[in-house]
Image (tube, helix red, strand yellow):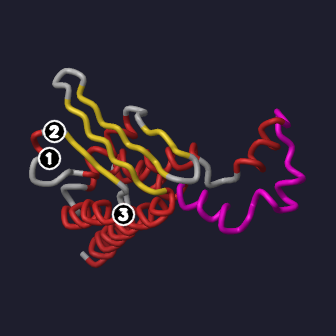
Amino acid sequence: MTLSQEDNLLLQAHFTTVLLIELKNNDFLDSSYYEQMKFGDPFIKDSLKKIKVDNQGALLMTLCAMLVLPKQLLENQFPAEFDNLNKFIDLIKLKANSSYESDSKSIDFVRHMRNAVAHGRVTFEPNVSVIFLDKNESSSRVCEIVVPISGMGFFLEQLQNIFRRYIGYLQEVERNDKNS
């Protein structure tokens, strides 16, 4: 199957995210392989052992790969999944408020969280929550969404489910192409 540039980008970003998850799940930083690795800077090797694989930076990279990139490319293809993602965030959030007129009936959590990540407006209350801030400077509109750290793994699983549907779709297209 020949993948479009967009498909290739999404698949590689997703596969890299899955690799990070599996490194964490298999305690890679505590492995003998990791201990034997040579780093150009020993400080980085020691720091990685302290902050682990599932750190704030990894979460932001994962959100870029699984929320910022695909939102534009997949939202039209999987609207029900993104609608369900909004409903899920509404259930797990600690708080949310928005001064955007478009949010008068209900907040579009996915859009605002995506914008916050894309513009580097994500902060952490360590071991408690992740705060997403979407701001429109010209119109003085602000949306703040606070999600508990404990909910972020579940949120990422929901994003992964969208990717699984997407990969299934690509596999179905490939099967149909072979049978044509």
Instruction: Give x and y (percent) for residue 19.
Output: 60, 59
Q: Which numbered marker is on residue 100?
A: 2
Q: Residue at x 77, y 42 (%)?
A: 47
Image quadrant holding the N terminus, namely: bottom left
Q: Residue at x 82, y 62 (%)?
A: 31
Mark 3 residue type: Ile
How packed mark 2 is, by other alpha carbons closer than 10 Å (few <14, some 14-19, many 20 or more), is: some
How packed mark 3 is, by other alpha carbons closer than 10 Å (few <14, some 14-19, many 20 or more), is: some
Is disc 2 in contact with disc 1, using a CB cutoff of under 8 Å? yes
**170 or 99: nearer the viewer:** 99
How packed mark 1 is, by other alpha carbons closer than 10 Å (few <14, some 14-19, many 20 or more), is: few
The rendered magenta stretch, by its main secondary structure, is classed as helix
Q: Which numbered marker is on residue 173?
A: none
| Residue where numbered disc 1 is placed | 103
**159 or 88: nearer the viewer:** 88
The residues bearing labels 2 and 1 have C-alpha atoms spaced at a distance of 5 Å
Q: Which residue is drawn at 78% across and 50% down?
A: 49
| Residue where numbered disc 3 is placed | 92
Q: With 2 as the anchor, is 23 left or right in this view?
A: right
Highlighted range, magenta: 17-42
In the rendered image, residue 36 lying in the magenta stretch gets the answer: yes
In the rendered image, residue 117 lying in the magenta stretch gets the answer: no
Mark 2 residue type: Tyr
Image quadrant holding the C terminus, namely: bottom left
Q: In this view, does 174 lie above or below 11?
A: below
**168 or 57: nearer the viewer:** 57
The residues bearing labels 1 and 3 have C-alpha atoms spaced at a distance of 18 Å
The residues bearing labels 2 and 3 have C-alpha atoms spaced at a distance of 21 Å
